[in-house]
Image: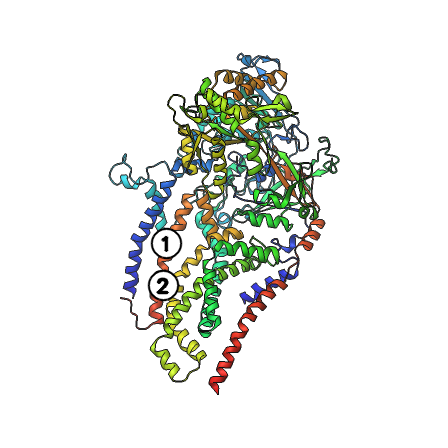
C-alpha cells in the first residue's frame, strides 16, 4: 500500500503543474499584468510610469511563459509563470498583490469556513441519510411519492434562493439570527447556525435522492430478499442490513470531499459576511488578485488529490476485499 | 464538552438581548458608531490612499494642515493642525516678491508657509517606544517580539511624541519616493520645486536595497522645515488650487519613526505595514484591522480636542446642527465598520437598528422614499414610524456621454461633426433617464461643472442653450425636431448619409453587459432611434474597455468624475487638450482639444475666484456646449438615511473627517433595537408542527401494518 501511495503522490505532481498552467493561462487570458496594475492603482491619475513600477515591484514585468530575450534555461525560468509557480509546490504562497501574507490569511480564514462547512457536511449527511431511509421505510406510500416530488423541487431551486429566503425568514421576519456577520470563538455559534441550516436544507434535495437510489439498489439484492424471507421486520432489514451495506459508497464519497471543506462556500460566506476562504476567493476574483486566486486554486487541487487518495484508503478499510496495489 | 459550550453560548446570547444582534453584548449602551464597508481598504498609507473606500479610515486618523468647514456652504477651507489657512506669496524668477495681484505670467514661484499648532501629539504607537536610555525599543526589531506580533496592539511598549513641522516635510518627501508609487507623484512633480529631482535621487538610492531609506537625509528643494512648528512649500509658478491638496491625507504628517519601524525586515510578511496600521494625530486610531470582517476605530487618548463649529449655514441652527457648538470633539468613543459585501444584509441591518446610517440604492428606494404631493421626496410611513431621517445633497460629480473626438464620424471640431453631436445631445432625454434609472436622484447637467462650485450658474444664465430653451421659468429640452434639423445639417437627413443614402450606424462602447444593464442600454438605443440612428452596443469587459479608451478606438462612451476639491479647474481640466487620454494618458477621456478653450484654461486655472474668473469660465463652458464633446448627463443627488439617535449629520462631499462631529444617543438606540427585534419563536414552531403533522398519517399507517403483521 505504501508503494501505491507514493505512486499516487508522484502522479499528483503533473496534475498540480497542469492545474497551475491552466489557472495561469485562464487568468492571463482575460487579465493582462497592466489590467491588474490599473485595478490596484485605482481609476484616477494612473500614469503609465506608475503601472510599470507596480509590475516591476511585483514581478509582473517579465514575459508570461517564454522569455525570448533570455538564454538557455532562462527562457523558461525568467518568466512570470516560473517565478510565481515554483514556490507553490513548497506551499509558500507569498503575498497577495496588495502585500498581505496569503498563508496567514488562509490559516486565519479556514476556521470560519470550517465552522460552517464541517457541521453542514456532518448534519447534512445525517439528514440526507435519514430522509432517504424514511422514504424507503414508507415505500409505496404517499410519503415516498410526495417526498420524492419535494426533493426534486428542493433540488431544482437555486442555492441563492435558499440563502435570501433563509435570511428573510429567520433573520428578518422571525429575527432569530443576525442577518450577517461573524465573531470569533464561541460567539460564532450565533452567526453560523443559520448558514448551516440553509446549507443543510439546500443540499437535502440532491443528497437524499442520491442516497435513496443507493439504498434502493441495496434493497433489491439477494441478501435483503433472504433477510425478508427469514421473517425479519422491515425496520430490522432497513437499519441492520441495507444501511450497513449502503454506507460503503456513502463513506468513501464523504471522505473524498472532506478535505475540500477547508475551502469554504463561495456564495454562502459572501452573503452571510463570514470571513472564510470562500469569500476570500470571491473577493480575490473581483479584485483580480492573481496571487490569491492561484494559491486557492492550487490548494483546492492539492486537497482534492488528498481526498481521492483518502477515498482509496477508505475503500480498503470498509471493504476488506479491496487491496491497493 | 465543546458542543455543550457552543450551545450554551447560543442560549446565553439569546437571553441577553435581541438574538439577532450582531455585536457583543458588552457594547450595549456605549457611544459607538456602527457602519459598514463593502470593499476592504487596500491602502491606509497617506502617500498611497486615494480611494473613496479608504477615506472613512484615513480621514479620521491623519490630520493634514487644513480641513473643510463642516457646516458652511460653499465649501470653505479652515485650519486643522495649522494656525491659519496659508496665503501664497509670489516671487519672480529673480527671487523678488511680487504683489498678490501680480499676473500669473510674472510669477515664477509661489510660497506657502504653514504654521502648525504646538502641543499636538501622535497616537500611541510602538514606533515611538523608547527605553530608559532614550533608545527606540523596536528599532531594530527584536526577533522574539516580532515572532509574537501580528497587529500593532500586540506590542507591549507604546509611546508618543509631539507633532513637528519636520513630520509634514517627511511625508511630502515620501510622496516623491518611487517605492511608494503615490498616485499624485506625477502631478506634484509638475508643481513642487525639486520634487522630480528627489524622485530620481531616491530611485537611485533605493534601487539596490529594500530596507528603510531615511528621507531626512535627502533634501527637497521646494519643501523645508523653517522651525519646529513652521514649514514652507515652494510651488512652481502660480497654482491657487494647491491649498486644496493641503486638506487631503496626502499632506498629513508622517513621523520618520513610523517609516523606520515598518520598513524593517519581516514586518511586511506579518502584515505590519503602514497600509494596514496608520499612525496619526487625529481623533481616532485604528485598533482592529481585520479587513475580512471588521475595522475598528477608537478614540485617540492623545487627541487634543477640537471645538465643534459655532457657525453654520442658514437653517443649521433650526436643524439642531449647532446644539453642540463649542463642545470638545470627538463625541463618539469608537466606530465599528463591518464588512458587508451584499446589499440585502446591509439594508436589513440598518432597518433593524444595527447600522446607524445607510445610503439608499435603487433596490430599496421605493421602500424608503416616495414622491410627495408637491413633487418633492419624502420618507415612506414605515421609515417615518421608525424615526429615520433623510438627507439629500447634489454630489460634486458629473456623469456624461462622451464622443471620441479622434473618431472619424463623431469626432472633429468642424460644423458638420459638431451638429451631429449636438443633435444627439438633444435626443438623449436625461430627465427621463434620471426618472427611470436613478429614481429621480439627480439633476440634468447643463455643463461640466456641478452645483456648489465656483463658476456654476443657476437659472436662465446657467442653461445649455444648445440643448435647452428657457420657458416658463425653467429649462426645457428642445423638441426632437430641432435635433433632426441639426442632424440633417450635419449631412444625415432622417438618419441617413446624404451622399450615400446609407443609414447612420454609431457604436457605443461600454463595460456594462450584465442583465441589469440591458434595460438601460435598450433605453439608450431608443434615444438614438428617435433620430433614426442605429446604435450598436459594443459591450466588453472592463479591462478591454479601458484598453479601447487608452488607444482611442472607442466611438461613444459613458464616463464620470468625482471632484478632488471644490474648484472649477478640477472639472474643466477634463477637457484640456494636453490632458488627452490618447497619447498623454490624461483624464480628458473624449480627447477634446480646442485651442481657445485651452488658452482660457491656462488663464482661468491661475485666477482667484472673482468676476474675471467667472467670465473666463462662462466662455469656456460656452465653447464646450457648442462643440459638444460631451452630451452632458447629470449630477447625482445623494440620498442618505440615518436613525434618529445619530446627531450632527450634514452631508459634506469634500470633508472626509466627519466622524468627530457625530454624536450618538446610545440609550435611544438600545431601546429602539430592543423594540424592533423581538424574536418570533411561534413561526418556526408552527413549521415544525406542520412537518410532524404531515408525517403522522404515515406513521399510523406503518404502525397498523406492523400490528397486522404481528397478528
Q: Residue at x 52, y 31 (%)?
A: B560
Provide the residue designation for mark 1: A301
In whole angstroms, how far apart are the C-alphas of marks 1 and 2? 14 Å
Q: Residue furthest bottom?
A: B711
Provide the residue designation for mark 2: A310
> In terms of secondary structure, where does tag 1 sit?
helix
Vertical placement of B621 versus B2: above or below? Answer: above
Q: Nearer the viewer, residue A73 or B6?
A: B6
| Residue B328 image point, x, y percent | 71, 38
Q: Is residue B192 visible?
A: no
| Residue B528 image point, x, y percent | 47, 31
Vertical placement of B247 versus A85: above or below? Answer: above
Vertical placement of B602 versus B397: above or below? Answer: above
Quadrant in which residue B603 is drawn: top right
Vertical placement of B633 versus A187: above or below? Answer: above
Q: Residues within 10 Å of mark 2 (few under 14, many from 20)?
A: some
Q: Nearer the viewer, residue B247 or A297?
A: A297
Chain hosting mark 2: A
Q: Quadrant of the N terminus of chain B?
A: bottom right
Please give left or right for residue B429 compared with residue B202 in the image. right
| Residue A189 image point, x, y percent | 56, 60
Q: Specify the color scheme.
A: rainbow
- Return the disc, 1 or 2, that comes first in the chain's sequence: 1
Q: Nearer the viewer, residue B699 or B667?
A: B699
> In terms of secondary structure, where does tag 2 sit?
helix
Chain hosting mark 1: A
Please give left or right for residue A187 compared with residue A304 in the image. right
| Residue B401 image point, x, y percent | 50, 30
Q: Which mark is residue A228?
A: none
Q: Are tags 1 and 2 found on a single chain?
A: yes
Amino acid at each position: 500500500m505504501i508503494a501505491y501511495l507514493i505512486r499516487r503522490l508522484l502522479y499528483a505532481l503533473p496534475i498540480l503543474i497542469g492545474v497551475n498552467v491552466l489557472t495561469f493561462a485562464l487568468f492571463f487570458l482575460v487579465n493582462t499584468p497592466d489590467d491588474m496594475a490599473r485595478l490596484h492603482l485605482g481609476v484616477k491619475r494612473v500614469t503609465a510610469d506608475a503601472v510599470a513600477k507596480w509590475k516591476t515591484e511585483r514581478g509582473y514585468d517579465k514575459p508570461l511563459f517564454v522569455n525570448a530575450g533570455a538564454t538557455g534555461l532562462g527562457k523558461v525560468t525568467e518568466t512570470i509563470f516560473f517565478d510565481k509557480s515554483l514556490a507553490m509546490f513548497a506551499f509558500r504562497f507569498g503575498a497577495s498583490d496588495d502585500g498581505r501574507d496569503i498563508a496567514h490569511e488562509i490559516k486565519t480564514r479556514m476556521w470560519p469556513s470550517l465552522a460552517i462547512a464541517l457541521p453542514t457536511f456532518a448534519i447534512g449527511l445525517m439528514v440526507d441519510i435519514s430522509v432517504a431511509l424514511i422514504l424507503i421505510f414508507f415505500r409505496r406510500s404517499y410519503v415516498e411519492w410526495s417526498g420524492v416530488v419535494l426533493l426534486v423541487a428542493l433540488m431544482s431551486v437555486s442555492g441563492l434562493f435558499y440563502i435570501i429566503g433563509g435570511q428573510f425568514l429567520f433573520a428578518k421576519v422571525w429575527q432569530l439570527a443576525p442577518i450577517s456577520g461573524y465573531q470569533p470563538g464561541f460567539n460564532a455559534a450565533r452567526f453560523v447556525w443559520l448558514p448551516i441550516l440553509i446549507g443543510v436544507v439546500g443540499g437535502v434535495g440532491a443528497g437524499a435522492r442520491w442516497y435513496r437510489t443507493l439504498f434502493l439498489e441495496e434493497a433489491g439484492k439477494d441478501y435483503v430478499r433472504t433477510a425478508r424471507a427469514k421473517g425479519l421486520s422491515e425496520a430490522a432489514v432497513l437499519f441492520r442490513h441495507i444501511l450497513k451495506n449502503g454506507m460503503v459508497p456513502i463513506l468513501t464519497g464523504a471522505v473524498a470531499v472532506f478535505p475540500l471543506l477547508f475551502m469554504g462556500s463561495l456564495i454562502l460566506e459572501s452573503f452571510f459576511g463570514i470571513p472564510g476562504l470562500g469569500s476570500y476567493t470571491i473577493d480575490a476574483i473581483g479584485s483580480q488578485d492573481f496571487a490569491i486566486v492561484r494559491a486557492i486554486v492550487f490548494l483546492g487541487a492539492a486537497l482534492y488529490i488528498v481526498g481521492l487518495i483518502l477515498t482509496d484508503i477508505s475503500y480498503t478499510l470498509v471493504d476488506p476485499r479491496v487491496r491497493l496495489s | 464538552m465543546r458542543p455543550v459550550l457552543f450551545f450554551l453560548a447560543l442560549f446565553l446570547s439569546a437571553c441577553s438581548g435581541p438574538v439577532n444582534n450582531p455585536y457583543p453584548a458588552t457594547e450595549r449602551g456605549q457611544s459607538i458608531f456602527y457602519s459598514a464597508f463593502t470593499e476592504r481598504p487596500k491602502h491606509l498609507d497617506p502617500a498611497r490612499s486615494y480611494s473613496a473606500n479608504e477615506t472613512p479610515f484615513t480621514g479620521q486618523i491623519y490630520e493634514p494642515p487644513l480641513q473643510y468647514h463642516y457646516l458652511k456652504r460653499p465649501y470653505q477651507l479652515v485650519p486643522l493642525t495649522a494656525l491659519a489657512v496659508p496665503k501664497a506669496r509670489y516671487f519672480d524668477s529673480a527671487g523678488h516678491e511680487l504683489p498678490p495681484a501680480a499676473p500669473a505670467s510674472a510669477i515664477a514661484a509661489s510660497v506657502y508657509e504653514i504654521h502648525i499648532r504646538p502641543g499636538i501629539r501622535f497616537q500611541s504607537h510602538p514606533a515611538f517606544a523608547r527605553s530608559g536610555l532614550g533608545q527606540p525599543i523596536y528599532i531594530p526589531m527584536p526577533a522574539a517580539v516580532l515572532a509574537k506580533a501580528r497587529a500593532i496592539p500586540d506590542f507591549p511598549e507604546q509611546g508618543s511624541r509631539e507633532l513637528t513641522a519636520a513630520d509634514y516635510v517627511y511625508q511630502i518627501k515620501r510622496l516623491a519616493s518611487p517605492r511608494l508609487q503615490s498616485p499624485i507623484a506625477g502631478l506634484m512633480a509638475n508643481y513642487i520645486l525639486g520634487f522630480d529631482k528627489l524622485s530620481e535621487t531616491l530611485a537611485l538610492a533605493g534601487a539596490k536595497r529594500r530596507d528603510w531609506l531615511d528621507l531626512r537625509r535627502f533634501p527637497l528643494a521646494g519643501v523645508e522645515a523653517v522651525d519646529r512648528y513652521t514649514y514652507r512649500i515652494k510651488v512652481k509658478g502660480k497654482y491657487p488650487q494647491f491649498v486644496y491638496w493641503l486638506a487631503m491625507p496626502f499632506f498629513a504628517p508622517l513621523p520618520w519613526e513610523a517609516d523606520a519601524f515598518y520598513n524593517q525586515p519581516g514586518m511586511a510578511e506579518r502584515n505590519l505595514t503602514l497600509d494596514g496600521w496608520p499612525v496619526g494625530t487625529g481623533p481616532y486610531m485604528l485598533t482592529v484591522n481585520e479587513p475580512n470582517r471588521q475595522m475598528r476605530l477608537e478614540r485617540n487618548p492623545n487627541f487634543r480636542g477640537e471645538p465643534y463649529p459655532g457657525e453654520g449655514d442658514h437653517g443649521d441652527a433650526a436643524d439642531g446642527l449647532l446644539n453642540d457648538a463649542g463642545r470638545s470633539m470627538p463625541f463618539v468613543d469608537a466606530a465599528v465598520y463591518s464588512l458587508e459585501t451584499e446589499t440585502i444584509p446591509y439594508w436589513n441591518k440598518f432597518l433593524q437598528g444595527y447600522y446607524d446610517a445607510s445610503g439608499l440604492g435603487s433596490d430599496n428606494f421605493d421602500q424608503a422614499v416616495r414622491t410627495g404631493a408637491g413633487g418633492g421626496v419624502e420618507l415612506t410611513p414605515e421609515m417615518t414610524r421608525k424615526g429615520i431621517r433623510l438627507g439629500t445633497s447634489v454630489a460634486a460629480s458629473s456623469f456624461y456621454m462622451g464622443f471620441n473626438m479622434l473618431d472619424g464620424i463623431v469626432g472633429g471640431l468642424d460644423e458638420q461633426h459638431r451638429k451631429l453631436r449636438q443633435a444627439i445631445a438633444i435626443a438623449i432625454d436625461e430627465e427621463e433617464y434620471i426618472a427611470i434609472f436613478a429614481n429621480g436622484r439627480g439633476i440634468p447637467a447643463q455643463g461640466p461643472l456641478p452645483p456648489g462650485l465656483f463658476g456654476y450658474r443657476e437659472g436662465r444664465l446657467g442653461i445649455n442653450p444648445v440643448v435647452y430653451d428657457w420657458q416658463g421659468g425653467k429649462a426645457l429640452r428642445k423638441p426632437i425636431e430641432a435635433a433632426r434639423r441639426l442632424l440633417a445639417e450635419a449631412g444625415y437627413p432622417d438618419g441617413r448619409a446624404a451622399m450615400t443614402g446609407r443609414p447612420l450606424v454609431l457604436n457605443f462602447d461600454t463595460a456594462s453587459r450584465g442583465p441589469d444593464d440591458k434595460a438601460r442600454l435598450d433605453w439608450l438605443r431608443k434615444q438614438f432611434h428617435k433620430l433614426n440612428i442605429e446604435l450598436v452596443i459594443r459591450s466588453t469587459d472592463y479591462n478591454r474597455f479601458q484598453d479601447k479608451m487608452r488607444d482611442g478606438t472607442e466611438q461613444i462612451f459613458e464616463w464620470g468624475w468625482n471632484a478632488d476639491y471644490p474648484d472649477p479647474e478640477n472639472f474643466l481640466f477634463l477637457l484640456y487638450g494636453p490632458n488627452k487620454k490618447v497619447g498623454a494618458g490624461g483624464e480628458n477621456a473624449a480627447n477634446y482639444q480646442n485651442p481657445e478653450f485651452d488658452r482660457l484654461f491656462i488663464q482661468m486655472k491661475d485666477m482667484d475666484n472673482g468676476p474675471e474668473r467667472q467670465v473666463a469660465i462662462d466662455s469656456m463652458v460656452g465653447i464646450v456646449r457648442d462643440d459638444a464633446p460631451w452630451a452632458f448627463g447629470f449630477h447625482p443627488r445623494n440620498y442618505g438615511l440615518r436613525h434618529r439617535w445619530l446627531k450632527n449629520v450634514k452631508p459634506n462631499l469634500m470633508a472626509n473627517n466627519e466622524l468627530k462631529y457625530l454624536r450618538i444617543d446610545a440609550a435611544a438606540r438600545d431601546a429602539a433595537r430592543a423594540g424592533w427585534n423581538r424574536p418570533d419563536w411561534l413561526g418556526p414552531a408552527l413549521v415544525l408542527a406542520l412537518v410532524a403533522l404531515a408525517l403522522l398519517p404515515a406513521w399510523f399507517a406503518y404502525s397498523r401494518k406492523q400490528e397486522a403483521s404481528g397478528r
